Amino acid sequence: MRRTVFDADHAAFRATMRAFIEAEVVPSFGKWYEDGLVPREFYYRLGELGVFGLEAPVEFGGAGRESFGYRTVLAEEIARAAVSFGGSSAHVTRCLPLVKTLATPAQQARWMPGIVTGDLMFALAVAEPGTGAEPGEMRTTAPLSVDGGTYVVNGSKTYVTGGVHADRVIVCARTAAPRPDDPSYGLSLLTVDATAAGFRVGRQLDTLGRKVSGTAELTFTDVRVPATDLLGTPHQAITHLAGQLPQERLGIAVGAYAQAKAAIRFARKHTQDRIAFTHPVSAFQNTKFELAACQTEVDAVEAVVDRALAAHDRGELGAAHAASAKLFATETAGRVIDRCLQLHGGAGYLTDSPIARLYADHRIDRIQGGSSDVLRTIIATEMGL
């Protein structure tokens, strides 16, 4: 069935990305996976291809695209090959939207060109060791100096995707005391230069999946940030971050769909190639039924994701709708990928197999961007429960 969310431009972009991944990513990905990191030069290449500039304004070298369909195409092609573009996901899906919507014209002129080319990689630092992203528990402080010229940041952050290679980090820090009725008040977003004195990249975290994402811990010791590097309105960081949640959750839903679709592709090929009792494994009724059931579930996810994608491109994707799409896509993908790994037998348990990478990479999707239980709460609230 033809999907109506894509046009000829999306198709051309898909062909370009598929050729690039097959020629330049797949041959090197095994080495990157062993190293646990993509080379910094890879981001320059993505900049050359225009991957970072898809949604960036034309005046800064971007393509000015408004459709999230291009990110959907990219997610599908990355999952199809069971590879990763490293920490660049946070650069374009978390940080670029914040800069687009919150940065002043002067800030955009300073940062956007580098964001587009890959010369200025961004990461987002919100969660803290021991407390996560709970606003009332954040301990990273950034009081404004007496002369009003600089913020002085002290504290630490964890789970920072792309933190290893980041040139700038958008840090959620407490610039004022919380209010009794609003623990999120006083938290602001500061864009911290990674070369600033007192900024340190700590250990790279050994994650279950997404091994090349460059996820790190960061520490700040008297890091001085110019007041001109405040992003958005002072003390309103949580409001700013919440405004990005529908798109973030759509992106996670899209990625989950792409991974489930890819898992079926790998399982189908493996069962056709694997011989058992003189027959391809795909010839057995159980295999056919399992793959048919998985395909049915992925067809349903595709419908949900495409509806959410169309709503987003019309500017109509609400918080509950995005939560519903993410919940359904991620929970369903988890089942599908698990069943497809089962069809691989022992081969699916090898860490260098594509299906094993998909299995490990997907697991975070039911946690990040709001866990499944949090999403159920949001949906129930929308239902008036």
Image (cartoon, rainbow, N blue to C red):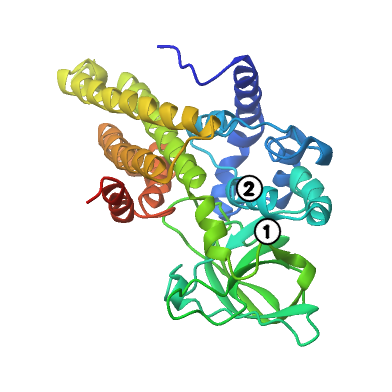
Q: Position of residue 125 (x, y in %)?
A: 58, 65
Left or right: where does residue 50 sit relative to residue 35? right
In the foreground, 189 or 275? 189
Mark 2 highlights which residue?
A: 97
Residue at the limit of the structure toward the left, as seen here: 285
Residue at image coords 43%, 32%:
308
| Res 115 seen here | yes
Q: Is residue 147 above or below residue 349?
A: below
* In contact (CB < 8 Å): disc 1 and disc 2: no
181 versus 313 height, above or below: below
Q: Is residue 381 above or below residue 353?
A: below
**Callout 2, which amino acid?**
Pro
Q: Residue shown at 44%/77% (left/top)?
A: 137
Q: Which image quarter: residue 25?
A: top right
Label 2 sits on a secondary structure element that is helix
Q: Residue furthest bottom?
A: 146
Dot label at residue 365? none
Q: According to the image, label 1 marks what residue?
A: 165
Q: Position of residue 34 (x, y in %)?
A: 54, 51
Q: Earlier in the sequence, mark 1 or mark 2?
A: 2
